[in-house]
Image (spheres, coloured by chain):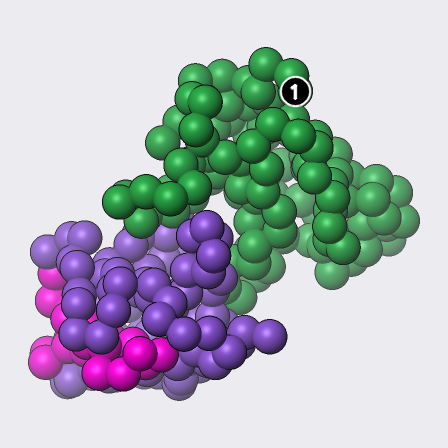
Chain colours: A green, B purple
Amino acid sequence: DAKTTQPPSMDCAEGRAANLPCNHSTISGNEYVYWYRQIHSQGPQYIIHGLKNNETNEMASLIITEDRKSSTLILPHATLRDTAVYYCIVRVKRSNDYKLSFGAGTTVTVRA
Amino acid sequence: SQTIHQWPATLVQPVGSPLSLECTVEGTSNPNLYWYRQAAGRGLQLLFYSVGIGQISSEVPQNLSASRPQDRQFILSSKKLLLSDSGFYLCAWGGIQETQYFGPGTRLLVL
């Protein structure tokens, strides 16, 4: 799976949009971008995934650049409960390698 | 909708004692099931995965074993716990297109 690079931390004001960047310059054509988050003392939570089109669900939006070398997760209206470590992962959607490789992620702190 | 349960939520066990952690999934059939471990401040390490009843694949050699006696039940076991077995144990199931969904986890402390 391609390696990803994320900033180690970022702060966000409550009620504002949080834009979380991820670089994946070595991504291959059949690899998807997945985002998970882990709130302290809980299991990771799936957020969203995409291949090349922008995606939106009830939690977030995923914007993937045209060359697919980077992406941005957008939390449209951050709340205090969005404070968590956010992980960007790229992997083949169906693969014999079942392992999800979580890097260090971005620690997002939402402040009142 | 699908839900995944793990128990117990926390466990304190002495070195050398046995271990049994259970994971069950509701609302889906024949899921892929996974056991991960997360050491304090570290990333997730895949321990075992299963693509069906009785089918277990181990990712790393260790003091632990896994079993899948029923379609939606996944058990993590040890005959004799080591101090290094302490950690946060997470069960996950793989949905359509292999997005993985995690349970609430079991925090194990071996003393």
Instruction: Give residue B104's position: percent from left, percent from top.
Output: 49, 72
Residue A37 seen in the current view: no
Q: Residue at x 10, y 56 (%)?
A: B61
Residue B72 is one of the magenta-drawn residues:
yes
Q: Is residue A18 visible?
A: yes
Q: Is residue A86 above or below residue B8?
A: above
x and y percent of residue B105 in the render? 43, 71
Residue A51 vertical placement versus A26 (above, below)? below
Q: Is residue A109 magenta?
A: no
Quarter of image, res A64: top right
Q: Please state the extent of the stretch shown in magenta in the rendering.
A: B62-84
SS state under label 1 = loop
Q: Is B71 on the left-hand or right-hand side of B103?
A: left
Q: Nearer the viewer, residue B15 or B9?
A: B9
Farthest top residue in view: A67
In this rendering, position of residue A98 left or right of residue A40? left
Q: Nearer the viewer, residue A47 or B38?
A: A47
In the rendered picture of this protein, how many numbered marks are placed on residues? 1
- The amino acid beneath tag 1 is Thr
| Residue under numbered circle 1 | A65
Q: Specify the subunit that label 1 lies on.
A: A
Side of A96 where A23 appears, left or right: right
Q: Residue at x 46, y 60 (%)?
A: B95
The x, y position of residue B56, in whole percent, is: 17, 65
* Residue at screen point 33% across, 66% down: B33
Residue A71 appears left or right of B69 = right
Compared with B61, B102 (above or below) is below
